[in-house]
Amino acid sequence: MSALTLRLPDDKHDRLRALAKSRGTTVNRLLDEAATLMISEFDAETRFRLRAARGAGQVERALALLDKAEGRTKSQ
C-alpha cells in the first residue's frame, strides 16, 4: 500500500471531514472511494473509445447486424 500526501485548503479539508463524519467513515476511506469511482469512469471511457475506434467506418455492417438480429431482411 502507498501513502499519498494531499494539500488542501483548510476549509475544504473541514468540509471533507464533515462529509466523512456524516457518512460514518474516515476522510481516507472517502477519498479512496472517490478515487475508485474516477478510475472506473476512466476505464469505461477507455473501453468505449477503443470499441468506437474498432467500429469506425462500419456503420452499414452494424445496421445489417441489427436488422439480422431483429429478423428483418433488406426488402422489409
Image (spheres, rainbow, N blue to C red):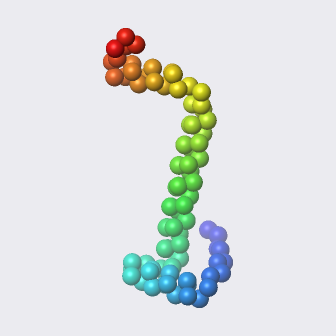
- Which residue is located at x 65 percent, y 81 percent? 7
Quarter holding the N terminus is: bottom right
Q: Looking at the picture, how far across and down is residue 70, in whole percent?
A: 34, 22
Q: Residue furthest front?
A: 75
**Vertical order, 9 against 48 (above or below):** below
Q: Looking at the picture, how far across and down is residue 31, in whole percent?
A: 53, 72
- Looking at the image, which is closer to me, 71 or 23? 71
**Vertical order, 60 against 41 (above or below):** above
Quarter holding the C terminus is: top left
- Which residue is located at x 55 percent, y 83 percent? 12
- Which residue is located at x 49 percent, y 67 percent? 33
**Vertical order, 56 against 42 (above or below):** above
Q: Looking at the picture, how far across and down is residue 20, in whole percent?
A: 45, 80
Which quarter of the figure has residue 47?
top right
Q: Residue furthest top?
A: 75
- Which residue is located at x 54 percent, y 43 percent? 48
Q: Looking at the picture, how far across and down is residue 26, in whole percent?
A: 47, 79
**Vertical order, 18 against 3 (above or below):** below
